[in-house]
Image (cartoon, rainbow, N blue to C red):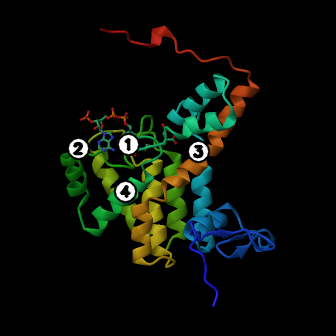
Amino acid sequence: GKVRAPTHIISTISDDRGEEPCYAGVPMSTIIEQGYGVGDVISLLWFKRSLPRYCTQFIEICIMLCADHGPCVSGAHNSIVTARAGKDLVSSLVSGLLTIGPRFGGAIDDAARYFKDAYDRGLTPYEFVEGMKKKGIRVPGIGHRIKSRDNRDKRVQLLQKYAHTHFPSVKYMEYAVQVETYTLSKANNLVMNVDGAIGSLFLDLLSGSGMFTKQEIDEIVEIGYLNGLFVLARSIGLIGHTFDQKRLKQPLYRHPWEDVLYTK
Ligand code: Q5B
């Protein structure tokens, strides 16, 4: 019989060899003619399956809510400074993207990991939060620079409302709310942030939709798919800030001396 030469690459998510490209086996014509959205495309290319509408809509809501949060956040600031240094679109974009990490926007995976572990082990919020404190780890998904008990993050509320209406179960999110109640008893700004809301609610989507095995959920959480939602979403805003600076013909940025504390 035929002997197949060993390949250097294995790929399982898309195929462009036929008459039309396919995403996870679904031809492009089906994607367009049947009105698939970005949430469906993400489901096919990231999770290799079609998800129910309420799940793909949730993904799209995450993308829309995280697309931008003004010019003052780390990512936008970097993109603005880079664009004003005369750099191109890709340089300005990646300069902003590179700030995404454990403190800014990139706490979704760790929020999912720690909330899942704590809930599945039956830890009370007190045991969880104090255990994290002993280890010197800040609770991912909790805390915000400008949001607080009296100035809640509307994005978190919108995500929670959507999930309460459409998800079969919100047990992980409810656990995260209990954690937030405890952290708020310590400081006013230790609210659930957008990373914590997406992290906990995506656990609910994965476990409640019936579309993933337990092993698949563990793998998604372990590999860390969910920061990808923030990276993808915020790219929209970072590109917008880059165009904005170029349109406004902004000069090279130089930080004012008065705003630096020079000490020995
Ligand atoms: N403390 C977010 O800190 C921030 C604690 C905590 C226990 C915590 C901090 C944090 C976890 C990471 C996280 C996502 C750095 C945030 C986002 C997207 C964004 C951004 C935007 C957008 C803020 C003061 C005292 C200290 C700390 C304690 C703080 N957080 N303890 N668990 N989680 N959170 N990131 O205000 O005793 O004095 O030493 O790391 O989830 O990125 O809009 O800006 O869309 O762009 O700088 O929304 O919470 O407070 O560092 O001065 O801490 O609180 O240990 O205690 P802050 P710090 P002590 S959403």
Q: Name the kind of residue labelled 2 in the image.
A: Gly
Disc 4 residue crowd, few under 14, some 14–19, many 20+, Cα 10 Å: some
The image quadrant that residue 88 belongs to is: top right
Amino acid type of the residue that numbered disc 3 sits on in the rendered structure: Arg
Q: Mark 2 points at which residue?
A: 136
Residue 246: percent from the left, percent from the top?
Answer: 73, 27
Q: 9 above or below 235?
A: below
Per the model, the C-alpha gap separating discs 2 and 4 is 22 Å
Say which of marks 2 and 4 sits in front. Answer: 2
Other residues around mark 2 within 10 Å, as few (<14) / some (14–19) / many (≥20): few
Q: Position of residue 70 (x, y in %)?
A: 59, 35
Badge nearest the viewer, 1 or 2: 2
Distance Cα–Cα, label 1 vs label 3: 19 Å
**Which circle's residue, 3 or 4, is located before the other in the chain?**
4
Kindly tell me whether residue 71 is visible in this rendering: no
Residue 216: quadrant of the picture: bottom left
C-alpha span from label 3 to label 2: 29 Å
Q: Which amino acid does label 4 sit on?
A: Val
Kindly state the secondary structure of the residue where label 3 is placed.
helix
Q: Pointers 1 and 2 in contact (CB under 8 A)?
A: no
Q: Who comes first in sequence, dot 1 or dot 2?
A: 2
| Residue denoted by label 4 | 177
Which numbered disc covers residue 97? Answer: none
List the residue tagged with mark 3: 234
Q: Quadrant of ligand 1?
A: top left
Residue at 38% over, 42% down: 143
Q: Is mark 3 within 8 Å of ligand 1?
A: yes
Q: Residue 143 carries which label?
A: 1
State the quadrant of the C terminus.
top left
